[in-house]
Amino acid sequence: MALGKWIGGFLGFISGGGILGMLAGFALGSLFDKGLDAVNTPDNLSSADNEAARQRYRQQSYEGQRNSFMFCLLVLSSYIIKADGRVMHSEMEFVRSFLRNNFGEAAAVQGDDILRKLFEKQKQMGNVAYRDAMRDACVQIARNMDVAQRLQLLNYLVLIAKADGQVTPDETLALKEMARYMGLSEQEVDSMLNLSKGAGDLNAAYRVLEISPQATDIEVKAAYRRMALKHHPDRVATLGDDVKHAAERKFQEINEAKERIFKARGMT
């Protein structure tokens, strides 16, 4: 489905007073045209066309995953950006940059429009009702998105919160709340909040690996292997180059935290 087409449907739900949980369900359940896919699946075509059909089918699946990821990022970003009661230019620009790099300038403009409409919706609904809608959206995401993609989505939300140079207690609370409803842990939020510090701060490095300074050397190595497997960039390769590059940066920072701990302990 073309980007403008599903965004148009999303805006239609918003203007019609639709619930954000419904919007998340729409994005995750029918992001691209299933009717077209049902007609032109590889199984329904002649053997001569099968390979080309499979390639088209895979491409549609990739685009569907990327659009779904983008939509979820927009919906959850609207909550994180306003978690401290302010809409910061730096946080808005971070989201615009993500959309621009993955989908082009038109998507950045459309995404900005969606975020502003979501802010309006939050004002109309009130903070409590909007928080409930975000909870429903996170639950829907947990049901429809694999763990690697959810972790990268959470990482983007953390980066958005950090975009203005500080993460407030309200933002941290919102991040941990969303993580829980997405089937992730508060420890994973703490890990991501400390990623940029892990190379130089030993305590931060332990938080990156989600362990305590009292962990044994064997536990440190096991924690690193677990983190490396969980956050490997190849697990989000289908979401586009910009997402993969962000995952690669995160992976590098995990390695830097590991090296900081290994050096402090004299481990090899």
Image (tube, rainbow, N blue to C red):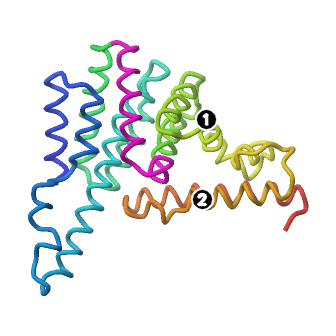
Q: Does 99 appear in magenta?
A: no
Q: Which mark is residue 6?
A: none
Q: From this viewpoint, which residue is outermost toward the front?
A: 43
Query: Where, quadrant-wise, is the C terminus in this rendering?
Result: bottom right
Residue, x 64% and y 55% (percent of image)?
A: 227
Q: From this viewpoint, which residue is outermost toward the bottom?
A: 48
- Which residue, given by chain and number where applicable, does mark 2 sit on? 251
Residue range (magenta): 126-152
Tell me which label, 2 or 1, sits earlier in the chain.
1
Q: Is residue 121 left or right of residue 6?
A: right
Q: Please, what secondary structure does the residue beneath circle 1 have?
A: helix
Q: Please, what secondary structure does the residue beneath circle 2 have?
A: helix
Residue, x 21% and y 47% (percent of image)?
A: 30
Q: Specify few, some or many for label 2: CA neighbours under 10 Å numbering under 14, 14-19, or 20 or more.
A: many
- From the top left corner, tell me how far across and down residue 184 is, in percent: 54, 40
Image quadrant where residue 102 sits: bottom left
Q: Nearer the viewer, residue 36 or 117?
A: 36
- From the top left corner, tell me how far across and down residue 107 is, in percent: 24, 47
Q: In the picture shown, does residue 51 fall above or below 82?
A: below
Image quadrant where residue 43 sits: bottom left
- Which residue, given by chain and number where applicable, does mark 1 sit on? 186
Disc 2 and disc 1: Cα gap in Å?
Answer: 19 Å
Numbered label tally: 2
Residue, x 36% and y 20% (percent of image)?
A: 130
